[in-house]
Amino acid sequence: MQEIKREVLVNKAKELLSDGTVDRVLGWKRGEFDYDVTPGVFRSAEELDSGFVWGDFCGANFSKYLVKETAKGEGRVLVFLKPCDTYSFNQLLTEHRFDREKVYALGVPCNGMLDISRIKESAEGIVSVCEEDGKVTADTLYDGKKTFDRDALLPDRCSNCKSKKHVAYDELLGSDGEVLDSGRFDEVEKLEKMTADERFAFWQGELSRCIRCNACRDVCPACTCEKCVFDNPDSGVENKAAADSFEEKMFHIIRAFHVAGRCTDCGECSRVCPQHIPLHLLNRKFIKDIDEFYGEYQAGAEVGSRAPVVNYTTDDIEPSQAVERGEQNA
Amino acid sequence: MQVNEYKPLIVAFCCNWCSYAGADLAGNNRLNYPADVKIIRVPCSCRVNPMFILRAFQRGADGVIICGCHPGDCHYTSGNYYTRRRMALLFSMLDYLGIERERTRVEWVSAAEGAKFAATMKDFAEKVASLGENKRLEDLRCKK
Amino acid sequence: MQRIGVFVCHCGTNIAGTVDVKAVAEALKNEPGVVFSTDYQYMCSQSGQNMIKEAVAEHRLTGIVVCSCSPRMHEATFRKTAQAAGLNPYMVEIANIREQCSWVHKDMPIGTEKAVILAKAAVAKVNLNAPLTPGESPVTKRALVIGGGIAGIQTALDIADAGFPVDIVETKPTIGGKMAQLDKTFPTLDCAACILTPKMVDVAQNEKIRIFSYSEVTDVKGFVGNFDVTIKRKARYVKEDVCTGCGLCTEKCPQKNVPNEFNLGMDNRRAIYIPFAQAVPKVATIDPNYCTMLKTGKCGVCSKVCTAGAIDYSAKDEYIEERYGAIVAATGFNPISMEKFDEFAYSQSKDVITSLELERLMNAAGPTGGTLLRPSDGEHPHTIVFVQCVGSRCAACEQKGKEYCSKICCMYTAKHAMLIRDKYPDTDVYVFYIDVRTPGKNFDEFYRRAVEEYGVHYIKGMVGKVSPEGGKLKVQASDLIYGKQLHIDADLVVLAAAIEPDKSARGLATMLTASMDTNDFFTEAHPKLRPVESPTAGVFLSGTCQGPKDIPETVAQAGAAASKVIGLLAKDKLLGNPCVAHSDEMMCNGCSTCEKVCPYGAITYQDKEFRMPDRTTKVRRIAVVNEAVCQGCGACTVACMSGAMDLRGFSSKQIMAEVDAICK
Amino acid sequence: MQNKKSENLKEQVLRMSGVNPSKCMRCGKCSGTCPSYDEMEYHPHQFVYMVENGDIETLMKSDSVYKCLSCFACVDRCPRGVEPAKLVEALRLCVIRQKGKNHMTADDIPAVLDDEMPQQALVSAMRKYSK
């Protein structure tokens, strides 16, 4: 259950719509099923009442939508931002990707959004999902009622939530949280401790399942290029479907490299990946390396901060040492 | 010499001001190093894009080495500092994906270090040859 | 598709010796885009270049690949040839099949195979070349000389003589450098001050030259023709334009025991001082580490005594920004430290001195007023031993000595020996040498005069040990020709210390992006053909900062550096480097990642209107590269995620084409 | 003047000592600093020169090889890092490795003994002078 109720969000949205501060609201609405929540735009109170959804499946990060929304040149848009979304909000602002005046940001506290694929692993044909005091029960067609412990359904990004603190908002609904020190690098360390062959086998297994649907790129708030190198025939690396295992690796290595130092670890890429490839482990590896080699850095913590990849000191470590560093825990 | 002695294919990106001049000096001094190393001249080591490195591996290279000026000597003041950070992260990621470490390398060679250039190339070629063919980053369609 | 001509050079036997040039030309014939492929004895010769011109006309070539020596040697030659043949000079690529192929691979088949691959890579690159025209950048008609020794002075005078304004930045309170500390100079034995001070006065009186003494360069930005330099004028606590240099304050100052670095600490000076009488600018300077007024606020004698009222205790360091077209490094040298040479007991006995300290002892303005006395007891020395090559030609360990020969010690030791024997005939002078190196005009005759006319004992052999005992210095040395071990009781031992570049040179080199060798001497663009230029355009080298040399060579090189500077400043505009970055408007996100990595600040942003497909206009923020400022390093092209930023002449597609050609 | 025998003798000395005599620039500092220069028939700079020229037998016959006190002053002060003392050590090994050729045997000691002789000198002598 989310700490803040749906009515609070809807009333606030209606209020801002009516007094003209905003002319449209970016919120969540019901997709195919209850748990299938997708972003939607609401322009009037009626639409809000009928369509607006707020619950345990509102995982979408709206920051990236603002790039296109604010370019539409209409009035201001109201957007609900969970704590981890606010970091992407700031990172996009640092890169001048949207006009801050065109946005009215409402900070919404969040205590973790559920990962439906974890329910689907053991329950077929889910009809509805409801929750009382920490227990989630899914009513299904074939397997009857299945109850789960809420924490077991949290995706990695929420169980290892890095910060409940809102770093950007015009107005905050509910209380602000704190930056948490989460075990988000444990998984990366586990991989690093494997031998090279094991790591190669692990990633070969994972990446070979990639169908290059580009969902991870299209949802990533750091991937907002006008034209991506992989779509641009002139770039020399242009490819649609990966015709060889090399191209799968190439796509994911280059994408991770392009967002290195800019990725706020919001976990959207893993959330939307239809093949459930743990893409966040790639980005986290870069974040872990950057923290270790060049000092703690959280992308999007404040607007205008200089990412480590576009910075240097005269006594950085040598690339050979960077790899040896892996030796200790390999 | 064995009949089908495996010969590694090595691409070396050399920065125009220091390491390319170091390579020339190695030539002037007639210092021998394996012919498998082919040099591409770039204005500065910071011009080398990770895409070029992966492209070389895709096309069948077995080792890629990036040579630049010693930190502090860069003709463009800060070029090699950026190379150092980019390649530190890239090499760490490649290692994370299980690619052999000795296939990629960054080396600082000044225009006066012809001997060091030849020795580095010889050492790198031997290490790559000992690893054998690049199986983990190869594109089967580009196989010779 | 381009129409490319491939020209494979034999370079006599340099290439043809280990690469089958005919086979290379043959192999390139059926490369895509190649319409003409031939080989010739010497492509860089006049006839070779004519061959290119004819081929361009005959085969209507649009691109040229020359497989020859390094592009650093003849790229310019073949670009001019292409231009003469009516082609854009940047449609030429060089395959380096000499330094990086024929000279380093002895075996013919391997060398040939590699040459073919390198040639194919060059062809692949030319296929994607586009005609480029170099941009122009203005030239600031003002030169900066860093270092005020004889090198800096001579360079500045020659530049000013050509009518260009020059600024000299000198860290010490006066210009003059090491030469001002010398007594006489070889080989003519005329007094250093007599030939130096007139030049210093010329500098002072020349209205084209500005002297920033007691100052240092703290930051250099920009590039040839447009260097933005920040100069820090250290607080002198004396107003330069008011002080008349009368020296009254230097007599009255109560703080008497400050080690005088001009006399290498052999005597003392006051807290407010003028280094030597002929100092230029003749202005006092207060030493903040010793002046009681500045440290405790209780004194102020100099301001009371000063009739001109030039003292200003509240002075602060001042920073000046200035723009220059050319910079000359003339940072000079220092003798190396003698601490590590315990075998000569330099730190145990005051009577073991370096040659520079001997110069001060023999100098009339020196601590002993010119009479040679032992620093320990002020007695007249009867037996003097000179030890050559102390720290020079020493490859044992870097911390102790230098591997190179310092070049000037043999001559100045002969000078010292001759002067001492001439002034004090009763002294015995021994010089222990490995070999005496006195090349050049009148040098060896000078050394022979020391031996034959003045009876200096030159002994081939090295001093093994000097042990101070009872006021005397027991020198133990080997005499290789006599085959004896000599034991001499000397009154004075003079070490001919090796010389090394000034410590400030390393920091300056980083600021100027000029490169240095392992001994911290500036690296010249080419040791034989361009000795006074640094590889960085617009930066020139004058004097010992480039390597050990004596005063005649320094003055000659200073004049050479000045002529290069004049050649540069005489131009109104400079042809820039056309291989600069440019951004593709349609793909640029305006995310200013590239701006952060640009070392020259060549990238700015503007909001531009774009017509979108649905007939609406949209304002987008895009990057704009100032092509006159960009130097073409390429850092931005990799920082740019979408690949909007690309480098002309080294575009991503071209480099990938080379990679493909190599790996095929 | 280099015949087959002296050729491999020289090669043996160089391998044992690890010294490269061609680095010597003939400055004579080793002899200049050698405390027992006067007792020696051939001096440190001559050791290096003679080994370089392969004239090993004369050195092995001469007594000066045993005059070296191994004080290593020459090694410490040689500007080219030639390490003459190591050559002396190698020459001594060549001498005692010959059949039956000990510079001094145990029973010669009492004759030479005097009470000020430090114990250490005796031990090092025995180590250096006999198999």
Image (tube, coloured by chain):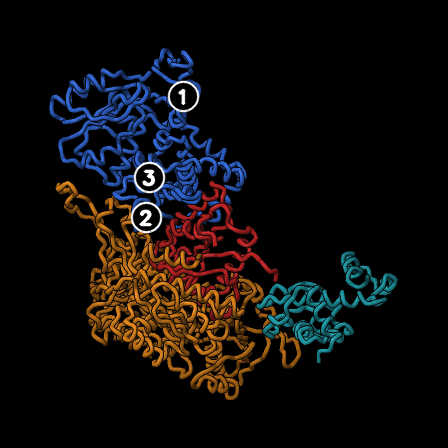
Chain colours: A blue, B red, C orange, D cyan
Task: Give the letter of the chain under mark 3.
Answer: A
Which residue appears at 42% of the width and 83% of the height? C187
Q: Nearer the viewer, mark 3 or mark 1?
A: 1
Numbered mark located on residue C639 in the image: 2
How far apart, in angstroms, are the residues tagged by discs 1 and 2? 41 Å
Q: Amino acid at mark 3?
A: Arg
Q: Amino acid at mark 2?
A: Ala
Residue at mark 3: A262
The image position of residue B61, as x and y in percent, is 47, 54
Task: Give the letter of the chain under mark 2.
Answer: C
The image position of residue C401, as x and y in percent, is 52, 65
Residue C179 visible in this rendered orientation of the protein:
no
How far apart, in angstroms, are the residues tagged by discs 3 and 2? 12 Å
Check contact, mark 3 vs mark 1: CB within 8 A.
no
**Along the viewing direction, whichever of A272 and A10 lies nearer the viewer:** A272
Residue found at the far front of this picture: C30
**Along the viewing direction, whichever of C138 and A236 lies nearer the viewer:** A236
The answer to whether dots 1 and 2 both sit on one chain is: no
Quarter of the view holding residue D126: bottom right
- Is residue D68 found left or right of C419 in the rendered image? right
Q: Amino acid at mark 1?
A: Lys
Vertical arrangement, residue A127 with respect to residue B91, above or below: above
Residue at mark 1: A120
Residue found at the far bottom of this picture: C453
Graded by Cα atoms within 10 Å as few (under 14), some (14 to 19) or many (20 or more), the crowding at tag 2 reads: many
The image position of residue B67, as x and y in percent, is 43, 57
Quarter of the view holding residue C232: bottom left
Residue A49 visible in this rendered orientation of the protein:
yes
